[in-house]
Image (spheres, rainbow, N blue to C red):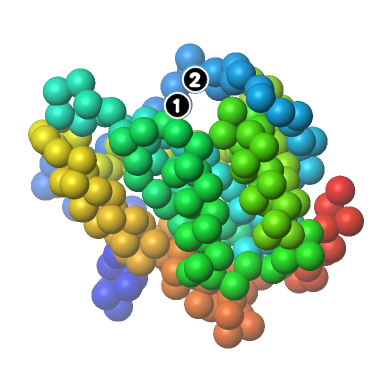
Amino acid sequence: MTLLQMGILMNRKKVQRLMRKFNLVCPIRKQNPYLRMTQAKKESVTKPNIVDRKFKELGPQRILLTGITYLFYGRGKKAYLSTIKDAYTNQILSYVLSDSLEVDFVLETIQQLFEKHSIPKNKNTLIHSDQGTHYTSIKFQTLIENHQLRQSMSRRGNCWDNAPQESFFGHMKDELPILGAINSFSELSLVIDDYMGYYNNERYQWGLAKLSPNQYADFIKMGEYPLKNLVKTPSLSQLV
């Protein structure tokens, strides 16, 4: 895919032959058979799973996936990353790194989303998450309501209901440099900023017609759909 961006057309089998010849290896992330979502403590009511794994149904900026992951760095240090991902374009629209697991950094991710993007309101956009305490909190649900979004949640203990978001976290950790060599939170922040720029602009994906997320989104803004997989955008009521 990188060769294509450089205007070099090369058969995939030839690429594989050259890789074998020069002992080039591309690490492949293996599925973790023991992956299970931790049962979260609820401080408020949960929401139904409206998305129901139909991640590509509504088009860009209509189904937004959010989640939190742990980042271990240095000697026993821990940070937390909150992201919001467009399920259709795979773009990371908003992210906040925190050294605390307080709910505020998740709220900041939502605020940052609306500062940077024009998100459809009037309940036309879904924000989908797991059933963690941050997303069942009164603060989070009130903020979502104030921004006129509709909330959806995965079923308890089912990581596949938010699979694209979990997949992003897994690939990110595989592709980042060894975090143990990072000594400070500020240094970690720079690494995360660099990775997000790389992911949105340079990480080409087969599922996006071999384009990066931002490139794919730009095609859509121009009224072009490289995959031709969105013939007619259904309404949210049709999805439900």
Where does residue 22 sit, x and y in percent of width and height?
A: 11, 47
Q: Which residue is found at the position 66% from the left and 33% from the top? A: 136
Q: Nearer the viewer, residue 156 or 230?
A: 156
Q: Amino acid at mark 2?
A: Leu
Q: Which residue is mark 1?
A: 31
Q: Amino acid at mark 1?
A: Gln
Q: Is 18 left or right of 11, judged from the image as shown? A: left
Q: Is 178 left or right of 32, judged from the image as shown? A: left
Quarter holding residue 32 = top left
Element carrying mark 1:
loop
Q: Is 235 left or right of 30, judged from the image as shown? A: right
Q: Which residue is found at the position 18% from the left and 47% from the top? A: 186
Q: Which residue is found at the position 55% from the left and 45% from the top? A: 66
Q: State whether residue 189 appears in this view.
A: yes
Q: State whether residue 52 appears in this view.
A: no
Sort mark 1 into few (<14), some (14-19) or many (20+) by Cα contacts within 10 Å. Answer: few
Q: Which mark is residue 230?
A: none
Which is in the foreground here, disc 1 or disc 2? Answer: 2
Q: Which mark is residue 35?
A: 2
Quarter holding residue 131 = top right
Q: Nearer the viewer, residue 231 or 234?
A: 234
Element carrying mark 2:
loop
Where does residue 210 sit, x and y in percent of width and height?
A: 44, 64
- Spatial CA distance of label 1 from label 2 is 8 Å
Sort mark 2 into few (<14), some (14-19) or many (20+) by Cα contacts within 10 Å. Answer: few
Q: Is residue 66 above or below residue 88?
A: above
Where does residue 36 sit, x and y in percent of width and height?
A: 54, 18
Q: Which residue is found at the position 79% from the left and 36% from the top? A: 48
Quarter holding the N terminus is bottom left
* Residue contact between numbered discs 1 and 2, judged by CB atoms under 8 Å: yes
